[in-house]
Image (cartoon, rainbow, N blue to C red):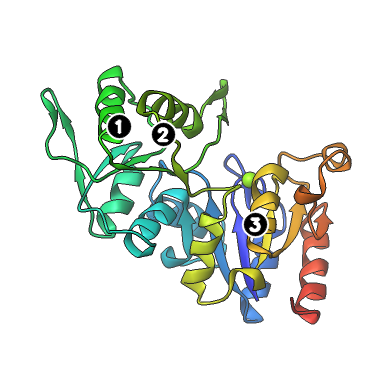
Amino acid sequence: MLLIVDLDGVVYRGSVPVAGVAEVLRRRAALGDTIVYVTNNSSRHRGDYLTTLAAMDLPVAEERIVTAGRATALRLADGTGPRPRAVMVVGGPGLRRELRDRGFRVVAPTRHGLAARPEAVVVGIDRRLSYGRLAIAARAIREGARFVATNRDPVFPAPEGLLPGAGAVVAALEVAGGRAPEVIGKPEPGLFESAARLAGVAPSSAVVIGDGLSTDIAAAHRIGARSILMLTGVTTPADLDVAPPERHPTAVAADAVELAALLERFAAEPA
Ligand SMILES: [Mg+2]
């Protein structure tokens, strides 16, 4: 069984592990399940997550971590459409590294514009966003570069409160570039499709474990997979009561004990 496991709100909250989840996943791995960890975040490289997850004693390998940044690089490399030679990144260092890992040339803006003409503009959260970079990226989009967004998350939680997410940067470029982007991350199916492709199984045979109705569970529906909503993150039982059918999980787990029981049940009734 392929388990597509969301990170924040399922495996940990902030820097604190969710009690019992590492043990459940170790047991599932020992029983033969494949576990792929996913996150809509694109600012960190998968190697950074490897360190965090290994320290929490989770069963993990770098190849089994798919950030929205990595899924975006995989899509550009293996998806339909011509492979871009030069890519401009409006995003963080992790996203640039994921693209370079797949052999893309990442071109940088200079005072005089771009160092080379990009065939794609890839957008994630960019904490060093400037008006100048926004202007250069928007021009490239208007001139025909492929426009790819890692995700459209409007905000993300930080110790100081909600901060603008990748979606805020994408929205600025959509308006200035005059065109909507392809979006890879949740609730779009691209991130989970990448995870399933890496595991070598059909997306619809996966089990998605996540804490977000409008992200994890919505994307699970898009790939036709079963899903388990964990109540250890952003969703409350009251949220679930008012959610539309396309955001209803197959099952709900309040904690790691309930998660373990559900996974046993799912394993006994294959999709
Ligand atoms: Mg989450």
Q: Residues within 10 Å of mark 1 (few under 14, many from 20)?
A: some
Q: Is residue 132 above or below residue 69?
A: above
* Quarter containing the N terminus: bottom right
Q: Nearer the viewer, mark 2 or mark 3?
A: 2
Task: Please say if the residues under marks 1 and 3 sit with CB atoms less than 8 Å apart.
Answer: no
How far, Cα to Cα, is label 1 from label 3?
30 Å
Q: Give the distance between the C-alpha atoms of the residues marked 2 and 1, in whole angstroms.
A: 8 Å
For numbered disc 1, what is the local secondary structure?
A: helix
Q: Please tell me which residue lies in front, 250 or 265.
A: 250
Q: Which disc is residue 142 wearing?
A: 1
Of 158 and 87, the residue lying toward us: 87
| Callout 2 amino acid | Arg
Q: Where does the image place residue 101, in percent across and percent down from the top left?
A: 28, 58
Residue 120 occupies quadrant? top left
Q: Residue at x 51, y 66 (%)?
A: 60
Q: How many C-alpha atoms fall within 10 Å of the one at disc 3: few (<14), some, or many (≥20)?
A: some
Query: Where 233 sits versus 138, above or below?
Result: below
Instruction: Count how many numbered circles sit on residues in the image.
Output: 3
Quadrant assignment, res 111:
top left
Q: Earlier in the sequence, mark 1 or mark 3?
A: 1
Relative vertical location of residue 69 with respect to residue 165 in this rendering, above or below: below
Q: Are marks 2 and 1 in contact (CB under 8 Å)?
A: yes
Q: Position of residue 103 (x, y in %)?
A: 23, 59
The amino acid type of the residue labelled 3 equals Arg
| Residue that badge 2 annotates | 179
Taking the image in four quarters, ligand 1 sits in the one at: top right
